[in-house]
């Protein structure tokens, strides 16, 4: 068979061989550079077509086959929205409170549902987005409260309210030590009866 004419052709009888030809894995020097099959390398299946390949599904070739890519870093090749490892916290109920320490999550450019990048604190019930919750001590039930305390409860515990009052109740709710810290005259306190 007579090959296509090319200047400097190193084999004029084979039309896969000429300067500038694509190097094929055929034990021939297709591009006439003196090297045989030198572009041979691994290509990785990209099943979900996100541009990232599966390290466990590779073939060796000189030319990139259709459906294969050169990288092998897809953490889930059956999900086109996930392709890289990102550190995140587990937050199943989506309330911002999380479980455990940061873990590696197979993600897209943002973390998938059920994970968050930062934590508001430990979640004592990650199946209930209403707990934990801040409750505000109001033992004298005058509607004026102190700063919030986190409780693992969907309802306010005895002596607490769900909302923070506009006025900070530093006299009727505060203990002696709290009053001292706040520079308040302990004699004005009524809550602890001292
Ligand atoms: Ca070749
Ligand atoms: Ca992929
Ligand atoms: Ca993927
Ligand atoms: Ca949570």
Image: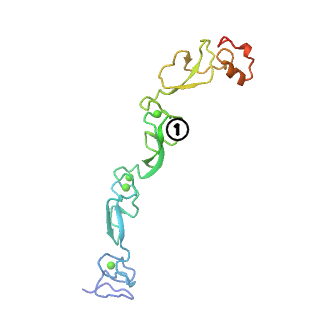
**Which residue sits at x=36%, y=79%?**
21
Q: Is residue 33 above or below residue 179?
A: below
Between 165 and 170, the one lying in front of the other is 170
Quarter of the image where the N terminus is located: bottom left
List x then y, in percent, for residue 75: 39, 53
**Which residue sits at x=33%, y=82%?**
17
Query: Going by the image, does 111 lie left or right of 57?
Result: right
**Which residue sits at x=37%, y=84%?**
32
Between 93 and 7, the one lying in front of the other is 93
Quarter of the image where the C terminus is located: top right
List x then y, in percent, for residue 26: 29, 77
List x then y, in percent, for residue 167: 67, 19
Q: Is residue 8 above or below residue 86?
A: below
Query: Going by the image, does 58 lie left or right of 124?
Result: left
List x then y, in percent, for residue 182: 72, 24
- Kindly identify which residue carries mark 1: 119
Between 186 and 51, the one lying in front of the other is 186
Q: Label 1 neighbourhood size at 10 Å, few (<14), some (14-19), many (20+)?
A: many
Q: What is the residue that sits farthest to the front in this orientation?
A: 194
What kind of element bears circle 1? Answer: loop
Between 118 and 122, the one lying in front of the other is 122
**Which residue sits at x=27%, y=87%?**
2
Query: Going by the image, does 12 lie left or right of 144?
Result: left
How many marks are shown on the rendered structure?
A: 1
The answer to which image quadrant residue 53 occupies is bottom left
Query: Going by the image, does 100 lie left or right of 174?
Result: left
């Amino acid at each position: 068979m007579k090959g296509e004419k090319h200047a400097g052709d190193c084999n004029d009888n084979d039309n896969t061989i000429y300067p500038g030809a694509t190097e094929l894995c055929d034990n021939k020097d297709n591009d006439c550079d003196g090297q045989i099959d030198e572009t041979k390398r691994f290509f990785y299946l990209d099943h979900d077509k996100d541009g990232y390949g599966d390290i466990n599904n590779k073939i060796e070739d000189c030319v990139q086959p259709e459906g294969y890519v050169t990288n092998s870093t897809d953490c889930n090749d059956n999900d086109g929205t996930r392709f890289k490892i990102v550190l995140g916290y587990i937050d199943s109920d989506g309330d911002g409170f999380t479980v455990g320490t940061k873990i590696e999550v197979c993600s897209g450019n943002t973390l998938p549902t059920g994970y968050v990048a930062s934590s508001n604190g430990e979640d004592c019930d990650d199946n209930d987005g209403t707990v934990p919750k801040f409750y505000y001590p109001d033992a004298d039930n005058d509607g004026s409260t102190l700063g919030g305390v986190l409780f693992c409860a969907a309802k306010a515990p005895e002596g607490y309210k769900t909302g923070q009052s506009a006025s900070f109740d530093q006299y009727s709710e505060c203990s002696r030590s709290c009053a001292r810290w706040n520079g308040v005259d302990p004699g004005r306190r009524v809550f602890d009866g001292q």
